[in-house]
Image (cartoon, rainbow, N blue to C red):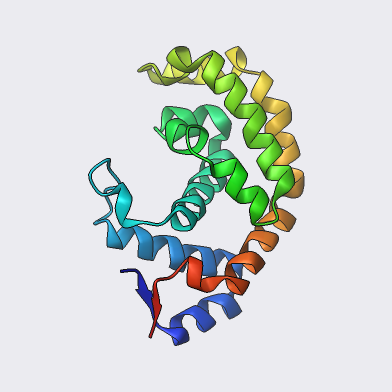
Amino acid sequence: MVQLSKDKLVTAYTQGIEEFLKLLTDTYLDFVDNDLSAENMDKLTGYQHALLAYRYFREEVNQGGFVQLIQNGYGGYIFNNPTAKALKLFGASETAKIIYKAAEIYRARREELERETTEEEFMAMYVDFEEFDDLEEKYFLIEEEETSRIVQFVKEHIEDFVDSII
């Protein structure tokens, strides 16, 4: 059961959307002993998985784009689950569209995108997969507003994201 104190939630929310998302998703990761696996996936709800997927999506795309996101092992978690559908429900419809388009590229070239690479090969992937560039740029332009929408949705539906508030 994912539990959080009301005080922690309020404090994190007043500190900003970054802290609020971090508190929730860190709590989810703690709940699965920082090792999300097939064996413990069912410990989290669909809403919790969607929020955790958004954290990974946001961090990875902001740091190194879709290539980094996929090379770091998050492609399947984000693209093979209803992440985009959930984000649309959360109010982030433009982010959902970006994920749908990125998923098409991922599915068409998954083997190549997920292969083990050297540092040099990894860097070369940014040239090989330029089709992600426009999607990343679109995301950068909307990221702040879309993240705010997600956080607002979470706040209004907190019982779907936290099992128990103490």
Left/right of residue 67 with respect to residue 153 in the rendered view: left
| Residue in the picture at 69% in, 26% down | 133
* Location of residue 101 with respect to 53 vertically, above or below: above
When asked about the image quadrant of residue 43, the answer is bottom left
- In this view, the residue in front, 159 or 77, is 159
The percent position of residue 35, horizontal first and vertical second, equals: 26, 48
How many callouts does the rendering have?
A: 0
Left/right of residue 23 with respect to residue 16 in the rendered view: left
Left/right of residue 30 with respect to residue 66 in the rendered view: left
- On the rendered image, what quadrant is the N terminus found in? bottom left
The percent position of residue 164, horizontal first and vertical second, equals: 38, 77
The percent position of residue 19, horizontal first and vertical second, equals: 52, 68
- In this view, the residue in front, 14 or 63, is 14
* Location of residue 10 with respect to 107 vertically, above or below: below
| Residue in the picture at 49% in, 38% down | 78
- On the rendered image, what quadrant is the C terminus found in? bottom left
| Residue in the picture at 59% in, 72% down | 155
When asked about the image quadrant of residue 26, the answer is bottom left
- In this view, the residue in front, 1 or 140, is 1
| Residue in the picture at 60% in, 42% down | 84
The percent position of residue 41, horizontal first and vertical second, equals: 31, 48
